[in-house]
Amino acid sequence: MKMSTVSFAELVETIGLEDLASINRDEIANDFMPASVTGLADGDFVLAHLPYTGRKAELYGENHFANGLVAKAMADVAMVNGLRPGLVYDFQTFAAEYFVTNSLFAAYQSDSTVKIFPEVVTIDDNGLALKRPPSHVIDYGACLTSRSYLNDQMNFITSDQRPFVFSPLTRTHFTNQVLLNTYKARYGQDVARAIIDQRFYIGREDGIAAATDEMVSAQRAQGALVEVADIILATGMQHTTPEDMRRGIENGYSLLKEGGMLVIRALARPAVDEIGTDDLAGWAYEAGFPEKNTLLYEADLSNIGSILLGGHFGEREIRTAVLTK
């Protein structure tokens, strides 16, 4: 597999760490890539899959999030110019393909604890009946567990129903490319092409606020209904900024159809620098969601999907809130 237009020397120069000069290509493929690739997606989420000691631990991180010098530097670069064609953009394309086909994470299903079926949404195995099969699902701060929603989309096809349109909103190129590659890897090139051609997948890479602002304004400019979504997922909120998420939740009230659901999933007791479920729900109430219609579900961070969601190891309580418009 080639790195497109990205050479190793260019990568070293872009990251700006002289230490990389002592790292060979095999280490880039086998160690650095799995450790830093998710940092390219969101800037604050990096997982090293192997324990490192000494200099490698400092460079890559040691089973923690965003604590390796290489990972931090790559994330900083990705956030600055990860939306523009060029070196970092090409690297994210390469990294996304590697992630789906070669990395250790490729073996994990990374199932979301929120599952969407034609007649029901399940949250930590709790069933919530739907009045109608959803036709459009918007995923705020889409992350790696969002691959699970592609399987949910296919459940509609196997039930002989029209699949829902899936709209993942990301901040940079990487996660969007992971999802597109997942279609190809799981369902084949023809299915992936059909999904894209029929606009059952509409990815955005400019962040939640910008994407939802444009959705609202575009619908109004065409004289069309702004209420286009049946379900809005805010289950990857730590993959964006508080300001970005808050604006998305404000727009979410306008974008949801009557009876549509906003699903919020975050930490029940966040630290000072974290966003918790109560914070997000509070913004939703300010936007117009009725508090009386809120359903709450409690769980612990225990599986790979929850670890990817929470960005932390250890036992931490997570809370899901379902708000209905």
Image (cartoon, grey):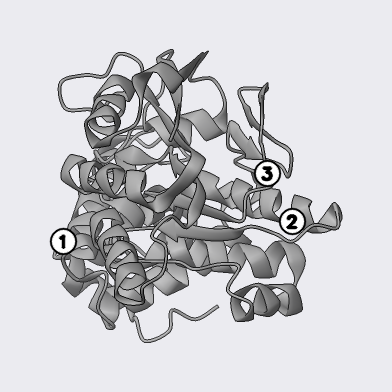
For badge 1, the amino acid type reads Leu
> Residue 171 at what x, y percent from top left?
30, 59
For badge 3, the amino acid type reads Arg
Left/right placement of residue 30 relative to residue 162 reads left
Asked if the residues shown at circle 3 and circle 1 are in contact, with their CB atoms under 8 angstroms apart, the answer is: no
Q: Indicate which disc, 3 or 1, sits on the residue closer to the N terminus.
A: 1
For badge 2, the amino acid type reads Met
Q: Residue at x 15, y 21 (%)?
A: 272
- In the displayed structure, 18 sits above or below 6; it is above
Residue picked out by circle 3: 132
Residue picked out by circle 2: 154
Image quadrant in which the C terminus is located:
top left
- Check disc 3 and report its element: helix, strand or loop: loop
Residue picked out by circle 1: 17
> Residue 197 at what x, y percent from top left?
62, 81
Kindly identify which numbered label has been placed on residue 110: none
Asked if the residues shown at circle 3 and circle 2 are in contact, with their CB atoms under 8 angstroms apart, the answer is: no
Judging depth in this view, the residue of 141 and 126 nearest the camera is 126
